[in-house]
Image: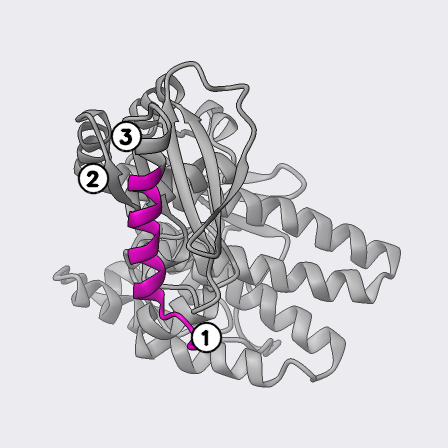
Amino acid sequence: MSTPLPNDVLSRGRRAAEWLAKEHPVSRIYLGGAPTAGLGSPMSDIDLFVVRADCESLPPAQLEFEGERVDVEYLDLDRLRGDVQESTVFRVTNTDFSQTARFSRNRLDVLTRFLLGEVVVDDGELAALRRRLTESMPDFRRLLITRHAIDAHNLTEDICGAILNGDAPATRYLSQELLHRATEAYLCMRGDLYVNTKWIWARWRRSASDLLKAAVTEVIDNSYAAEGDVVRRNRFLAQDLLVMAATGLEYEPVLGADPEHHTRRTDVCVIPMKGDGVLIESIRGESVLLSWQGALLWGISHGRPREEAVRLMGGVLASKGLQVGEDEIAAYHASLVDVGVIGLP
């Protein structure tokens, strides 16, 4: 028996959707899941999403079609409309996290699958909703990044707790999960949207910049290094990936911990805010709201001497078409040191 290719999975999914629409009175069905995002494997299941009015109580179902399993999930039309409407204007601030409170990881997963999915049966409603979501992509993407960043913040708290408990296996596992969330945020910034860690390194291979592929490869290749080294590198890299996701700019991360260079607090997280703001917040509740330039300089400074950080900051800004003199950057750097945002050795 030949193994089906992902394109065959999609073709069978289309036929299954058309069959389901004929067998049952449904007028809105779309395909979702890994194959519609250019991911998956020949073993990937067919995921059909049936959008109906008043179907909140309908449980997921499994059907057999052409000898293969088909997973069917029912979505309520009014809820989908409301989620699209609420997700298309990013409005998270350091005093209002109600939007991310509404949109859990699972809820954003549903919207992302809808965005990336393939509408097979429609009365016009799904096309209109997806068009609105597509037209608001910058805001939706920033909401996704912020969700990943908040999840990373929660994982950072868990890591610190595991360290206090002396639980090395849990610490290592949680640091890997932290790196996964930060990587999802970074890939989202680069336009590779998908809310699932199953295919995260396949996405990394196809979407990450060459600048960062070497750094992550180093972390993966050293996964059997000393426990503390692995955890520290995971946390360092996750922090830098979150800075890049929040600012939209890239720099080469420093994974070492040279005591002669600027210090790094691993209990601090980076969360994008409405506009160009970026919240730098520790798990103890200490926080500072920076511009994207300030957050970028904060990230670049980790593990580097001042002169190198200033020079690199100028180069990164120039890559965006912003010409800022090193004297001006150095003065800004000094101001962040004075208020304790950038730590000294």
Q: Earlier in the sequence, mark 2 or mark 3?
A: 3
| Closer to us: 118 or 173 | 118
Q: Amino acid at mark 1?
A: Pro
Answer few, some or many: residues within 10 Å of disc 3's Cα (few below 14, many 20 plus, some between 14 and 19): many
- State the image coordinates of residue 337 (x, y, percent, origin top left): 47, 55
> Residue 85 is drawn in which quadrant?
top left
Q: Residue at x 32, y 68 (%)?
A: 207
User: Please, which residue is most extreme toward the top here?
Assistant: 54
Q: Which residue is mark 2?
A: 134
Q: Are marks 2 and 3 in contact (CB under 8 Å)?
A: no
Q: Are marks 2 and 1 in contact (CB under 8 Å)?
A: no
Q: Amino acid at mark 2?
A: Thr
Q: Earlier in the sequence, mark 3 or mark 1?
A: 3
Answer few, some or many: residues within 10 Å of disc 2's Cα (few below 14, many 20 plus, some between 14 and 19): some
State the separation of the CA atoms marked 3 and 1.
Answer: 41 Å
Q: Decide: is 51 above or below 135.
A: above
Q: Decide: is 14 above or below 316.
A: above
- State the image coordinates of residue 311 (x, y, percent, origin top left): 29, 73
Label 3: which secondary element: loop
Q: Amino acid at mark 3?
A: Thr
Q: Which residues are magenta?
A: 1-19
Tag in front: 2 or 1: 2
- State the image coordinates of residue 91 (x, y, percent, origin top left): 34, 27
On residue 305, the disc is 1
On residue 49, the disc is none
| Closer to us: 213 or 298 | 213
Q: Answer whether residue 52 is visible to the viewer in this image.
A: yes
Q: Which residue is mark 3?
A: 88
Answer few, some or many: residues within 10 Å of disc 1's Cα (few below 14, many 20 plus, some between 14 and 19): some
Q: Residue at x 60, y 64 (%)?
A: 235
Q: Quadrant of the C terminus?
A: bottom right
- State the image coordinates of residue 302 (x, y, percent, origin top left): 49, 67
